[in-house]
Image (tube, rainbow, N blue to C red):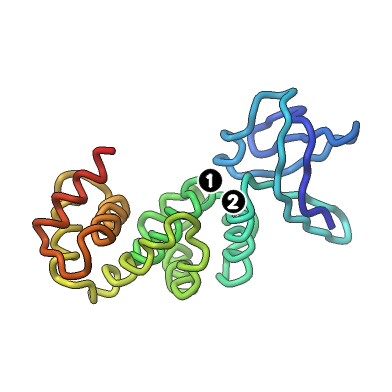
Amino acid sequence: MIGKLKGIVDEIGEDHCIVDVAGVGYVAHCSARTLSALPEPGSPVTLFIETYVREDMIRLYGFQSTLEREWFRLLQNNVQGVGAKVALSVLSTLSPSELANAIALKDAAMIARSPGVGKKVAERIVTELKSKAPAFAGDAAATIGLSQDLGEGTAAAPVSDAVSALANLGYSRDIAAGAVAAALKSAGEGADAGTLIRLGLKELSR
């Protein structure tokens, strides 16, 4: 099995790239997010690979991080109706942290923005991966607990009010939740809504 490719970008296509490793060109199918992050052809690159082997073909899927690859596996192995194509579509639309936050907030509509992902599949993703989201949130792990509380309606009133206030100012709910989570770190659990809003806005202005 191939787990990683380290070589030179030879070609970047609409849904794949070719990586030249010691003269051998490997075709790796990638999310739009990974493809957009690739350097120009002729530049060195490292891709983390998921290898699919079938009787009639071998297909490589490439990712810019191990976390993105883990979400690719997680989506397919735990959610009925999600195959490689749908998983790549979701990961093309949302970063791992954005996906984890959408699941924590029960925001199926955000996931349904992915091409080819209907409402029912998006709702299954939220339901089936709810308990797994915090472990696959990457740098946003600290905010996922808060997002889950907001999604469940169990967040403390000052926290919920602060997130709503920031959302009313035009920030998305996940960005607002992240800012309030950062504010809570510096202000402490007993902070009132006004303090959290002020610190949250300061965080968002950075």
- Position of residue 127 in the picture relative to residue 149 (left or right): right
Residue type at the position of mark 2: Leu
95 lies above or below 43 = below
Q: What residue would you read off at disc 1?
A: 92
- Position of residue 138 in the picture relative to residue 156 (left or right): right
Image coordinates of residue 100 in percent, x first then y, are: 44, 61
* Residue at x-position 35% and y-position 57%: 109
Which image quadrant for residue 130?
A: bottom left
* Residue at x-position 62% and y-position 60%: 70
* Residue at x-position 73% and y-position 51%: 49
Image coordinates of residue 67 in percent, x first then y, are: 59, 56
Which image quadrant for residue 97?
A: bottom left
Q: What residue would you read off at disc 2?
A: 88
Image coordinates of residue 204 in percent, x first then y, are: 26, 43
In the picture, which quadrant includes the N terminus?
bottom right
Query: What is the CA distance from the residue labelled 2 to the residue labelled 1?
Result: 6 Å
Image coordinates of residue 64 in percent, x first then y, are: 63, 44
